[in-house]
Amino acid sequence: MDELIKAAKIAFATEFNYYLKAHYFHWNVEGPDFKQYHDLFGGIYEEVYGNIDDFAENIRKLGGYTPGSFSRFNMLSQIDDELAVPPAMQMISELLADSEKTYKVLKLVYDLAEASGKHGFSNFLAERMDAYDKHSWMLRSTLK
Ligand SMILES: [Fe+2]
């Protein structure tokens, strides 16, 4: 169970950083297709943020404490911060790579939750993984 809680905190911090990066890109993207990219990032950050609270409460349900500071998120997150303002297409390819990475992090927690018989949590994680498949599809299609 300790291993599951530890992995869940890592996935939670990764999702929080992913949410923040999508929102950051939503704010700062520029170019002739501004509106399209602004809305693409907007849909993604809203979806991820809409599930943050449930994820945090799932960690509490397992008996763990939920991380909630930027320094802790940075320690745990498996995706890197973006400090620059990259060109629009680079933002999209970076967020695509982060989507695929986040999916893998969620899958590790999913496998641990299944092995621990925590099927409510694994159901939640399966839905998160499906959401990242959708984010990846939209970002990948925009790059073509
Ligand atoms: Fe906005």
Image (cartoon, helix red, strand yellow):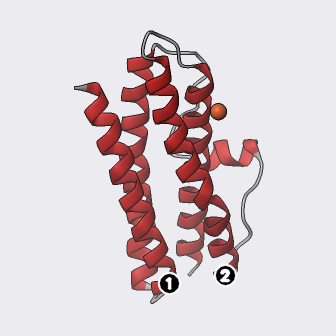
In the displayed structure, 13 sits above or below 141; it is: below
Q: In which quarter of the image is the C terminus?
A: top left
Of residues 124 and 106, the one drawn nearer to the viewer in this rendering: 124
Ligand 1 contact, mark 2 (Cβ < 8 Å): no
In what element is the residue under mark 1? helix
Place residue 109 in its image quadrant.
bottom left
- Left or right of 83 in this view: 40: left
Specify the label residue 120 is tagged with: 1
Front tag of 1 and 2 = 1
Q: What residue type is labelled 2?
A: Lys
Residue 80 appearing in the image:
yes
The foreground one among 97 and 65 is 97
At which x and y percent is residue 56?
67, 66
| Above or below: residue 142 compared with residue 7 | above
Q: Which of 115 and 136 is in front in this view?
A: 136
Residue 61: which disc? 2
Residue 13 shows in the view: no
